[in-house]
Image (cartoon, rainbow, N blue to C red):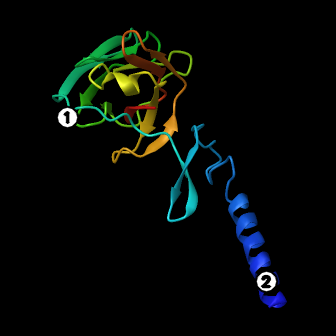
Amino acid sequence: MSGMRTRSLLLTAFIVLAGASCNSALTPTGVSAPDVPVSSSLVGGVLQPALSSLLSCPAQPVAADTEAIGPLGGTLAIGPHRLVIPAGALDSTVTIIGVAPSDQVVSVEFQPEGLRFDPEHLPRLTLDYSQCGLVRNLLPKRIAYTTDGLQILELLPSLDDLLHERVSANVHHFSRYAVAW
């Protein structure tokens, strides 16, 4: 019985150490993992961390805007959402498309995907969440860079304007962004 207990303790220690070694602050590409608030929940008798989630809201109609924006900058108005591109962010004129899909998540997709901006003149994205209800609006919101399937890849440093029910953040490139809490 003592040998079985020793093996069980060794196996438990191995699992704990293996799990701890997988919890690196860096991903395989060397990019820092997102700073995500962590809570926990009990799943199948095992304590699981729960990451930030996207804010769930009633679906709104599709909204879109297309603008040719160049070195002097410009603004896209995608329904209630705004993308302000300052002067100097782009070297040449680019046709920019912003679409807010009809979904239960407040999000905007930008084209051309991967478009990058001068780091000294970053565009400012503002997402409106006024249709999402009061209870969740009291919690601090952030803008999340997501996959097309709405998995959070990174939480951006954001400013949450509770009074006007919108959140803003600078973006470095085009992709899909959504409101997280």
Residue at image position (49%, 39%) is 52
Of the residues shown, which amino acid type is indicated by label 1?
A: Ser
Quarter holding the N terminus is bottom right
- 53 shown above or below 179: below
Of the residues shown, which amino acid type is indicated by label 2?
A: Arg
Label drawn at residue 102 = 1
Label drawn at residue 5 = 2
Instruction: Kindly tell me whether residue 41 is visible in this rendering.
Output: yes
Choose between 156 and 16: the one closer to the eye: 16
Secondary structure beneath dot 1 equals loop
> x and y percent of residue 174 in the render?
39, 32
Choose between 78 and 90: the one closer to the eye: 78
Which of the 4 image quadrants contains residue 133? top left
> x and y percent of residue 47 in the render?
58, 57
Secondary structure beneath dot 2 equals helix
Which of the 4 image quadrants contains residue 7? bottom right
Q: Residues within 10 Å of mark 2 (few under 14, many from 20)?
A: few
Q: Residues within 10 Å of mark 1 (few under 14, many from 20)?
A: some
Residue at image position (19%, 34%) is 102
Choose between 114 and 44: the one closer to the eye: 44
Q: Is residue 103 left or right of 160 when viewed as pictured?
A: left
Q: Nearer the viewer, mark 2 or mark 1?
A: 2
- 105 shown above or below 124: below
Instruction: Kindly tell me whether residue 90 is visible in this rendering.
Output: no
Q: Is residue 50 left or right of 68 when viewed as pictured?
A: right
> x and y percent of residue 149 in the render?
34, 48
Q: Residue furthest left?
A: 61
Which comes sooner in the sequence, label 2 or label 1?
2
Q: CA distance from mark 2 to mark 1?
A: 56 Å
Residue at image position (51%, 15%) is 121
Which of the 4 image quadrants contains residue 72? top left
